[in-house]
């Protein structure tokens, strides 16, 4: 059988990931079949298995790559805890606004991961959360932040920051820079950082 046009690995693999991401975000992992992904990519269903063992591996790869890139893309600057927190907040908002579909599946499709894959994703999420918690802990120790429970504050801040992807729309009332600044101000006030 002749190879479907455009099914070369360097073209098909990225197209497969982009298509799966879009379909998982739009319809949910459970509702999307490999046959449906193949049809949108433009290859025979059996050809997909040249690029991924199965749908579960595809979901896991998307989630893992998202979190590994997030971790690699930001490190605390050598600065005060307040400056580190501002850097974290602004980076989180920018990074997540650029990837709303990935953010959506990284949170909403955890339930569809097999136990081994779930453990890997949870470890990566904890690594990211630990970075924020470390900033908060240092700020509290330095008397810069007034926090009763650093773990709870970490979870609350991450939930607030990640929630931006549920409502933000390009071209809306607020531009990205304004959103970044407003979220930073809310985060700063929530840890009772003294006014600048």
Image: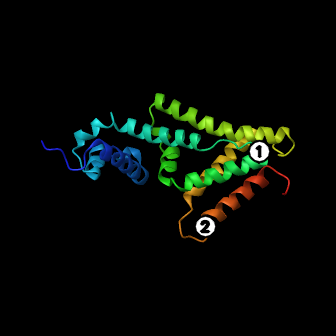
Q: Which residue is mark 1?
A: 79
Work out whether 175 lies above or below 28: below
Corner quadrant of residue 167: bottom right
Residue situated furthest front in the rendering? 78
Which of the two discs, 1 and 2, labels the residue nearer the N terminus? Answer: 1
Q: For residue 148, say whether it is visible.
A: no
Residue 142 image-quadrant placement: top right
In the image, what residue occupies the spot 60% across and 51% down?
Answer: 162
Q: Is residue 141 above or below residue 156?
A: above
Check disc 1 and report its element: helix, strand or loop.
loop
Residue at position x 36%, y 50% in the image: 19
Q: Which mark is residue 122?
A: none
Q: Quadrant of the N terminus?
A: top left
Q: Quadrant of residue 62?
A: top left
Q: Position of residue 56 (x, y in %)?
A: 39, 36
Left or right, residue 92 beside residue 119: right
Q: Is residue 156 left or right of residue 145?
A: left
């Amino acid at each position: 059988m002749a190879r479907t046009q455009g099914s070369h690995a360097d073209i098909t693999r990225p197209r497969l990931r982009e298509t799966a991401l879009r379909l998982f975000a739009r319809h949910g992992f459970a509702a999307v079949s490999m046959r449906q992904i193949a049809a949108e990519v433009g290859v025979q269903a059996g050809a997909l298995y040249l690029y991924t063992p199965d749908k579960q591996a595809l979901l896991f790869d998307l989630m893992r790559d998202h979190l590994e890139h997030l971790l690699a893309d930001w490190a605390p600057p050598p600065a005060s805890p307040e400056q580190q927190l501002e850097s974290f907040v602004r980076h989180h908002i920018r990074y997540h606004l650029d990837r709303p579909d990935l953010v959506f599946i990284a949170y909403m499709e955890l339930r569809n991961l097999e136990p081994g894959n779930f453990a890997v994703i949870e470890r990566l999420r904890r690594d990211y959360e630990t970075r924020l918690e470390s900033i908060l802990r240092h700020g509290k120790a330095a008397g810069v932040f007034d926090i009763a429970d650093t773990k709870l504050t970490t979870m609350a801040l991450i939930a607030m920051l990640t929630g931006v992807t549920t409502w933000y729309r390009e071209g809306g009332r607020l531009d990205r820079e304004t959103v970044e600044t407003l979220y930073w101000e809310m985060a700063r006030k929530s840890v009772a950082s003294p006014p600048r």
